[in-house]
Image: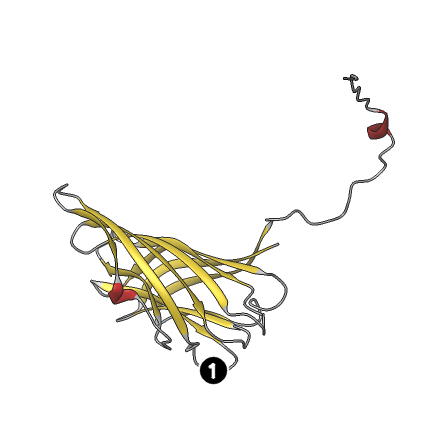
Amino acid sequence: MALVKHTNNSLSNITALPSAVPTGKMTLLSTATASSSASLSFDSTYINSDYQIYKFEFINIHPATDEVKFTVGFRDGGTAYDATKTTTSFVAYHNEADDNNNLQYRTDRDLAQSTDFQILGVEIGNANDENLAGELTIFSPSSTVFVKHFIATTQLTAYHDFCQEAFTAGYCNVTAAIDGVQFKMTSGNIDSGIIKLYGVK
């Protein structure tokens, strides 16, 4: 077998690098800060055909009301965040007393061709040190051919001293473009917290 030798001659002839944007680059598009807010919404100013992937990050989401759920709704061209969804969810939990833990598929959080808001986390406490964090990613929301898939993971401090991690996924079963996303609690306001929206190349 012949020995193959490589030289650096070709590298010395490079005069410029390609101008392509690196795959996976995240661009911050918007930051929403809650202050006793009924909801936090993002519209078509940010969610459009500019990116194929949009990612939301939830930072220190603190509810005004104790033992509430954090939810998301999607808008498909109208004024309401009621795009039809089919979803699935499971949760892992462990309490501070170290005597109760489990991993469960949660049918009570599933949606089947429903216009309801999707639950992303439950039983969030409103004590000063209790909150929720996590992320949600939606893929190709501007497509008018395919359904729009989304995946979410949240970690929260429950009102009864439990650590809960929820895994939620599903799709908006519409061919219309998704042009808005809204987050809110099932009861009361979002007392404080930040949601950041990124576009991903």
The disc labelled 1 sits on which kind of residue?
Thr
Give the residue displayed 56% in from the left and 66% down from the top: 46
Q: Position of residue 49 (x, y in %)?
A: 62, 67
Give the residue displayed 56% in from the left and 64% down from the top: 140
Q: How is the image coloured?
A: secondary structure
Q: Quadrant of residue 123?
A: bottom left
Q: Quadrant of residue 124?
A: bottom left
Query: Can you see residue 149?
Result: yes
* Residue at the outermost bottom position: 78
Question: What is the tally of numbered marks visible in this picture?
Answer: 1
Left or right of residue 134, residue 93 in this image:
left
Q: 166 or 58: nearer the eye?
A: 166
Which quadrant of the rendered structure holds the C terminus? Answer: bottom right
Q: Which residue is mark 1?
A: 79
Which quadrant of the rendered structure holds the N terminus? Answer: top right
Left or right of residue 112, residue 42 in this image:
right
* Residue at the outermost front position: 1
Q: Position of residue 67 (x, y in %)?
A: 20, 62
SS for callout 1: loop
Crowdedness near tag 1: few (<14), some (14–19) or many (≥20) residues, C-alpha within 10 Å: few
Left or right of residue 65, residue 3 in this image:
right
Q: 89 or 152: nearer the eye?
A: 89
Q: Is residue 21 above or below residue 13?
A: below
Give the residue displayed 45% in from the left and 71% down from the top: 172
Q: Quadrant of residue 2?
A: top right
Query: Can you see residue 59?
Result: no
